[in-house]
Amino acid sequence: MQSRIASHDARSSEVFDVKAEKMLFVCTGNVDRSRTAQDLLSGKDAFEVRSAGTWEWAVRRISKEDIDWADRIFAMEAFHKEAMLRLSPGSGDKITVLDIPNMFQRGDPGLVELLKQRLSKHGIVV
């Protein structure tokens, strides 16, 4: 996905294509945390967003293809990162652990606020 961005340079009215950053959010079951994160960024031109879970019975289970697809991956907990490294050992540089515990339901205002705070530390303002 690409976005059309108008230049803000007064000397130019040039329009250029900007590649949307591919973001993947991962939790255990792909029910609450990762889906809430996906909901936060979905529809924003700067991002293509997916979510997945590491659990065998996750709504959408993580795959090596998901990991390869993503530019940046946000794992909710360290063991999610470990699971992804087993699927794709060379992907560690693009995985960030947000340290968000499994105590929230999808869309919970506390979860939304925590996601916004943690993502802002990585240059993502929602």
Image (spheres, rainbow, N blue to C red):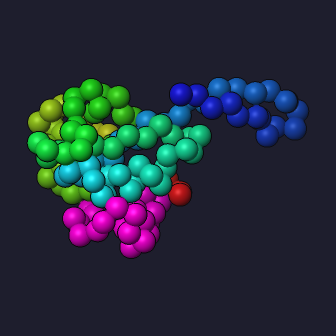
Q: Is residue 82 visible?
A: no
Q: In the displayed structure, does residue 18 sit left or right of residue 14?
A: left
In the displayed structure, 30 sits above or below 18; it is: below
Residue lying furthest right: 11
For image coordinates 59% across by 40% down, the residue present is 45
82 in magenta: no
Residue that appears at 11% across and 36% down:
86
Q: Which residues are magenta?
A: 95-122
Residue 19: quarter of image: top right
Q: Please give left or right for residue 68 compared with residue 13 in the image.
A: left
Q: Position of residue 111 (x, y in %)?
A: 37, 67
In screen coordinates, is 13 left or right of 16?
Answer: right
Q: Nearer the viewer, residue 124 or 112?
A: 112
Compared to residue 104, the image places residue 31 above or below, namely: above
Quick check: can you spot residue 116?
yes
Residue at the limit of the structure toward the bottom, as seen here: 110
Which of the 4 image quadrants contains residue 2? Answer: top right
At horizontal 85% and vertical 30% (from top left) the residue drawn is: 12
- Asked if residue 118 is among those painted magenta in the image, a careful observer would answer yes
Q: Where's residue 115, x and y in %?
A: 40, 62
Total marks placed: 0
Q: Is residue 125 left or right of residue 95?
A: right
Give residue 74's position: percent from left, percent from top.
Answer: 32, 49
Rendered residue at 28%/33% (across/down): 67
Q: Quadrant of residue 122?
A: bottom left
Is residue 14 placed above or below 7 in the rendered structure? above
Q: Nearer the viewer, residue 59 or 91?
A: 59
